[in-house]
Amino acid sequence: MQIVGYETEREDRRPALLVAEDGRVRREPLRPGEDLAYALGERRCAGALDGADHYPCDRDGAPYCEAHTSTWVCARCTGTCLKDEMDCHEDHAVYLAAFAPATFKVGVTREWRLRTRLREQGADRAAHLRTVSNGRIAREIEARIAETYTDRVRVPDKVAGLHRAVDDRAWSATLAEFDHEATFAFDYGFDLDSGAVPETLATGTVVGVQGRVLVLARGDTTYAVDMRELVGHAVRPEADDRDRQSSLEAF
């Protein structure tokens, strides 16, 4: 068995790990309150997926080897198309996403995916700044705003803010700099009283999922797991009983 992917929460889909066995993929739903019990083994390339079919790969690269790594050139676009021919001819939204307590990220996405994209990233709040007619214009605007606000937030920074609230004063001051069409606040169904310990494991009681961060409770400690770091691991369907770093609250 191997963890070969994950799904973040969307309005029409609950989060899940994707587990492959004998060429078939099944969803392991990550429902709050349910127990997850996988012991992690070696990590290698997760191979390729085609619907419910899995094509394994024995190469060492993880989560994907060079043969199974795809590069999305649009992620590097700043308004000058890197493809042979520009193909993003549909409405794009430019947005600001807030991550607690006060990290504000600019981004773009196709307008119809705005709420989904924000939840995929685990944003606590967001503002839809404007809609433009294509991706080129959106990327130009993003590049200008990125001179002041970041266009990338690392997972460790998101984990550090899981138990905190967005700084209202800082967020309001930021929004005052922009005209915007709408604002959003997201609830991922859980609240933490204290910080979660960053760890790579797949054993514990599911507290919730925010973006690609899976929060697990184990003993008296809450762990925050970057699900991308699980992809590629061989797994056994049993609890992992290895000692893990504990939070101060466990003592």
Image (tube, rainbow, N blue to C red):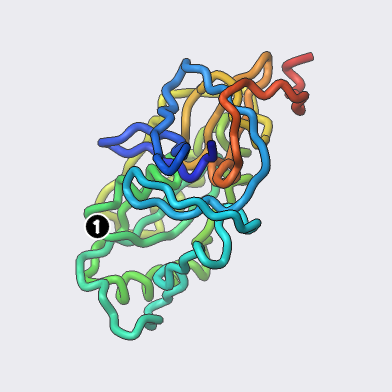
SS class, disc 1: helix
| Residue located at (32% from left, 70% from top) | 138
Q: Nearer the viewer, residue 122 or 129?
A: 122
| Residue located at (29% from left, 84% from top) | 85
Residue that carries the numbered disc 1 in the rendered image? 111
The residue most toward the front is: 22
Q: Is residue 174 above or below residue 206?
A: below
Q: Nearer the viewer, residue 223 or 94?
A: 223
| Residue located at (63% from left, 45% from top) | 156
Residue 227 in the image, given as x and y percentages of width and height: 54, 41
Q: Is residue 192 above or below residue 68?
A: above
Q: Nearer the viewer, residue 37 or 10?
A: 37
**Is disc 1 surrounded by few (<14), some (14 to 19) or many (20+) residues within 10 Å?**
many
The residue most toward the bottom is: 84
Looking at the rendered image, the quarter that the C terminus falls into is top right
In which image quadrant can residue 12 be found?
A: top left
Q: What amino acid type should be assigned to the residue bearing mark 1?
A: Glu
Residue 151 in the image, given as x and y percentages of width and height: 49, 62
